[in-house]
Amino acid sequence: MTVCVTAQGAVRGRIGAAGVTSFLGVPYAAPPFGPRRFRAPAPPEPWPGIRDATACGPTAPHAPYAPPYDALVPDEVVPGEDCLNLNIWTPAPEPGAGLPVMVWLHGGAFTNGAGSVPAYDGSTFARDGVVCVTLNYRLGADGFLHLPGVPDNRGLLDQVAALKWIRANIASFGGDPGQVTVFGESAGAMSIGLLLSTGRARGLFRRAILQSGACHHFLRPASAALIAARLAAKLGIEPTPRSFAAIPLTDLLTAQAELRAEAGARPDPALWGEAALNMMPFEPVASDPVLPGPDCGVDLLVGSNQEEFRFFLVPTQRLEAVGESRLRAGTAAYGLDPDRALPLYRAARPGATPGELLAAVATDWFYRIPAIRLAESVPGSYLYEFAWRSPRFGGRLGACHTLELGFVFDRLQDSWYTPLVGDHPPQALADAMHQAWISFAKTGDPGWPPYDPATRTTRVFAADPALRDDPREAERRLWEGVR
């Protein structure tokens, strides 16, 4: 056992394999319930003596993933009000070690996930000389519902509170508070994009890695108000903090899940605003955030997976249900002229079905083009693409959403990842990707040239990783001026 001291009190961690010490379930903010419900996070209360930190704490309230995703995506639900907590893995739990710090923001469409999922165990980063931190933040209505009289984006405010706690305390665990890299996937990466574009967390991290998410997914206040009103109507209440706080948590979580399903089944902009396209009714609220630009003061590594959207179509058997009319309507909804765009997408994918073509267009709209736009906005950024294809579902999943996580965390043998990566994923690719992330956190250089609009050099992580200049240039050009 090892003891470290924080501003709130001492915590006792556990020494594990390879000399890595973990401190789990450490509060970075007070429980967000009772009078603190729907409020900005408050500082944690001090504790007497030495607090045990050998087990993960409660997760932010959320419902489990619906089938089939409950068997595919890392997640867990641990009840309890003290859910604003974080976990630390360190190879040197002592002041003065000055190690780089990596802070993980989990994904889950702003309604699911937790930093304490075993799949996000940070010991592999600590093994390689980095202090790794994972954290929980409020989700769904508690974290992101737009309500009168309380701050928006409470989940983002939680992330900022955690980063402030890390800045104040991480030196006790061997970390350098001036060398923090925040990294996240999907909703976690989108959170980082909004933190960058709004400047809300300016000065709290030096570098950022955004996996499958950038600055383009948010709700304008009018759309957010529509969603709050629809959720309130579903529950038979007024759309006020007091009314939502009076609803039993299990009922609120059930209604949230039903609302998400309704948005996916009937994606009408008149009902959902921006959420009609990205099908995320709970997400950050912003007027019109701008890309961060060259003066953001943060080194960036950003990218996406080559076939992200297959994750949302293949397991549910929706890929085969897409016909030509749905393909054309979807392409137009994303802002492209189907007559101009679809011949180009088809030419690069001979024999592709309408569902496979829609997945390619949606992948670009959701993930690839936002990543490129972010890299373009901050000179010196690095761009990657993950292209290794999963063998699952007869190989139809491809290089889908979330597939890169086991490679980034170098945990391919973890059973949490097996449903997507299969039984024999390439360890050499995990070695390459994991080390690139660590190199970026330590030096700001992942090991390939920065993204330059003249060359558009992109590191492609496949069975044989390579550098490519402007992958799928013709398709990228279709999106110029679109979003």
Image: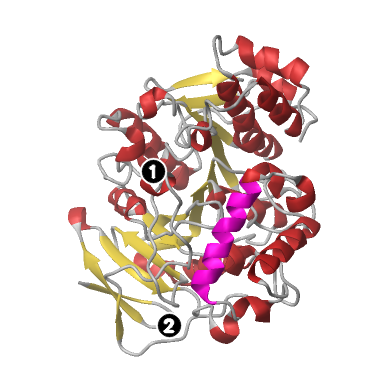
- In which quadrant is the C terminus drawn? top right
Residue 458 is situated, as x and y percent measured from the top left of the image, at 55, 26
Where is mark 1, residue-wise? 72
Q: Quarter of the image containing the N terminus?
A: bottom left
Marks 2 and 1 close (CB-CB < 8 Å): no
Determine crowd level at label 1: few under 14, some 14-19, many 20+ residues with C-alpha closer than 10 A.
some
**Nearest-to-viewer mark from 2 and 1:** 1
* Residue 389, percent from left and from top: 41, 25
Q: Is residue 425 above or below residue 419?
A: above
Which of the marked residues, 2 or 1, is nearer the chain's N terminus?
Answer: 2
Residue 46 location, x and y as percent?
A: 43, 86
Is 347 in the magenta?
A: no
Please state the horizontal and vertical placement of residue 460, each as a whole percent of the image.
Answer: 48, 25
Residue beneath the point at 65% across and 18% down = 473
Q: CA distance from mark 2 to mark 1?
A: 38 Å
Point 46% across, 32% down: residue = 447
- Say which of 54 and 271 sits in front: 271
Crowd around label 2: few <14 · some 14–19 · many ≥20 (10 Å): some
Is residue 292 visible from the viewing direction of this image?
A: no
Question: What is the number of the mark on residue 292?
Answer: none
Specify whether 144 is left or right of 129.
Answer: right
Image: 381 above or below 346 = below
Left or right: where 92 falls relative to 35 = left
Q: Majority secondary structure of the magenta segment?
A: helix
Q: Is residue 170 left or right of residue 264?
A: left
Q: Disc 2 marks which residue? A: 8
**Residue 397's image quarter?**
top left
Residue 463 visible from this viewpoint: yes
| Range shown magenta | 248-264
